[in-house]
Amino acid sequence: MEMQGLCDLHTHTTASDGMQSPADNVRLARQKGLAAVAITDHDTVAGVPEALEAGRQYGIIVVPGIEISTRMKEKDIHVLGYYVDYRDPVFLERLEGLRRTRDERNGLIIAKLNDLGIPITMEEIKNRLGRPLEPDETLGRPHIADVLVAKGYAADLRDAFDKYLAEGAAAYISVPRLSPGEGCRWIREAGGVPVLAHPGLYGDDELVRSILEQEKPDGLEVSHSDHDAAAEAKYRDMAESYGLIPTGGSDFHGMRQGVVFHGELGGRTADIKTLERLQAAVQGA
């Protein structure tokens, strides 16, 4: 059954920690009957040009996006950006700095795993890709989790995160990050619209409210693969109370070790009218 007029506004590709190419995400969106798909890789826009070309081929609207890693009150906070200028040189330079921070964090995670008696190297992680890592692409914790599972230190991706990589787990590492407000500013200065991602994952609605009040994103990701119906209703009410654009997306990463991380592409969506509101926010900036 086609889902005409619906958009998945949160997907990842091989440019960061997704398993499918940008073109494959667009092709899958077409198969699912979606009207639009956003490419929102972590701290990189490297997958956007390929996705835009695929969008022309498949007749799918492709939204150039980003998911920026920030931190506030000892929690990792993600800020989505829509309609960013993926060619803006200042924005690209800033993202390169974020990727360097990510690389440093990955090295510290590997060192901590080694201290725990788990022999794992960056070379192993890169080799699991099966191809060279492109200059603007990023490696993330799912890549590390993949090797942990392959070497028998975890049963699956979720187990690897629960044991070693999630916040508070044995090999979790926190590094200095931007504030959510800085992430919002970077996105706006690149011509985009900032949206607070998956508020339900932070486990702290007071923190969410303080971000909305202090950092002032333009939207809130209401529909997400890890939000149940009650959470979605709560965050939709919250978005309305703050006058924010309610967005939705699957946070699709593809399948690793037989497990779909977060959700299937198209499993969580927003109406096409959401794009109109995001575009209006760009024009009104």
Image (tube, grey):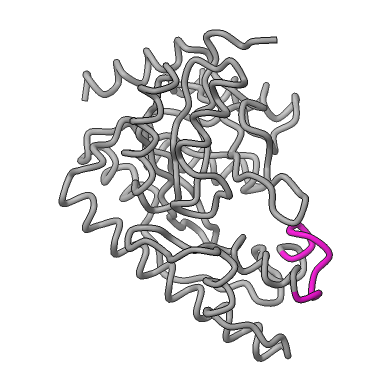
The spot of residue 62 in percent (x, y) is 39, 26
Residue 108 lies left or right of residue 114; in this view the side is: left
> Seen from this angle, which residue lies furthest left?
89
Q: Quadrant of residue 159?
A: bottom right
Residue 115 appears at what percent x and percent y?
66, 91
Q: Residue at x 47, y 54 (%)?
A: 16
Magenta stretch encompasses residue 158: yes
**Residue at 44%, 52% in the rendered image:** 15
Q: Which residues are magenta?
A: 151-160
Residue 26: x %, y % from top left: 49, 30
Residue 184 at x, y percent in the picture: 33, 42
In this orientation, which residue lies closer to the viewer: 238 or 160? Answer: 160
Question: Which quadrant of the rendered structure holds the C terminus?
Answer: top left
User: Which secondary structure is most common in the magenta stretch?
Assistant: loop
Q: Nearer the viewer, residue 256 or 140?
A: 256
Instruction: Give left or right: position of 141 versus 164.
Output: left
Residue 134 as seen in the image, left or right of residue 228: left
